Amino acid sequence: MSEKNIDSTLVPYTTTLAVRDRCLCLHAQRAARALSRRFDEAFRHLDLKSGQFSLLMSLNRPQPPTLGAVAELLAMDRTTLTANLKPLERRGLIRVEKDADDRRLRRLSLTSAGKELLAQATPIWTRLHAEIEAQLMDPDAETLRTGLNALLKS
């Protein structure tokens, strides 16, 4: 259908305003982008993005997790996770190795450089995260986290 044939009254402007004001997806996306920008700026001097910090932190475990376990934790598909791992691997921050028992699985681990970077970034995250939580209004941060996590299960 050509653009000139679209009837702008099919979706009234009042619906546009309702979506703008009430859409949980829109509000979550906007908040996520704003949070990412704040953390990106705080981590800039470490040459680290907020998503990379989350990925590195997800690998900070006693035993190296599988690619699938990390993808599930971060709510990412494996292809997206693999693409996000590559720059970290090139920087020498992580290792991707085949599982010793099941060669089909890949295990992810932090290198010593990755652990060092994470150690530098964590106090920055702690300070900024506390500032952001202090800005939240009712519901408190824990109620918000609980509600957002409930959406992951549906």
Image: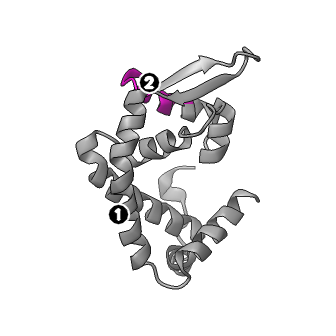
Amino acid under label 2?
Glu
Residue 127 is labelled as 1
Who is closer to the viewer here, 84 or 106?
A: 106
SS category of the residue bearing label 1: helix
Who is closer to the viewer here, 116 or 85?
A: 116
What is the span of residues highlighted in magenta in the rendered image? 82-93
In the rendered image, the quadrant that contains the C terminus is bottom right
**Which of the two labelled residues, at mark 1 and mark 2, occupies the earlier sequence position?**
2
Residue 111 sits in which quadrant?
A: top left
Who is closer to the viewer here, 79 or 85?
A: 85
Residue on which the image places disc 2:
89
User: Would residue 4 be seen by someone viewing this image from the given angle?
Assistant: yes
Inspect the magenta stretch and tell me whether residue 13 lies in it: no
SS category of the residue bearing label 2: helix
Q: Is residue 36 left or right of residue 55?
A: left
Residue 19 sits in which quadrant?
A: bottom right
Q: Identify the residue at image location x=50%, y=74%.
A: 20
Mark 1 and mark 2: Cα distance apart in space = 27 Å
Q: Identify the residue at image location x=66%, y=62%.
A: 149
Inspect the magenta stretch and tell me whether residue 92 lies in it: yes
How many other residues sit within 10 Å of disc 1, few (<14), some (14-19) or many (≥20)?
A: few
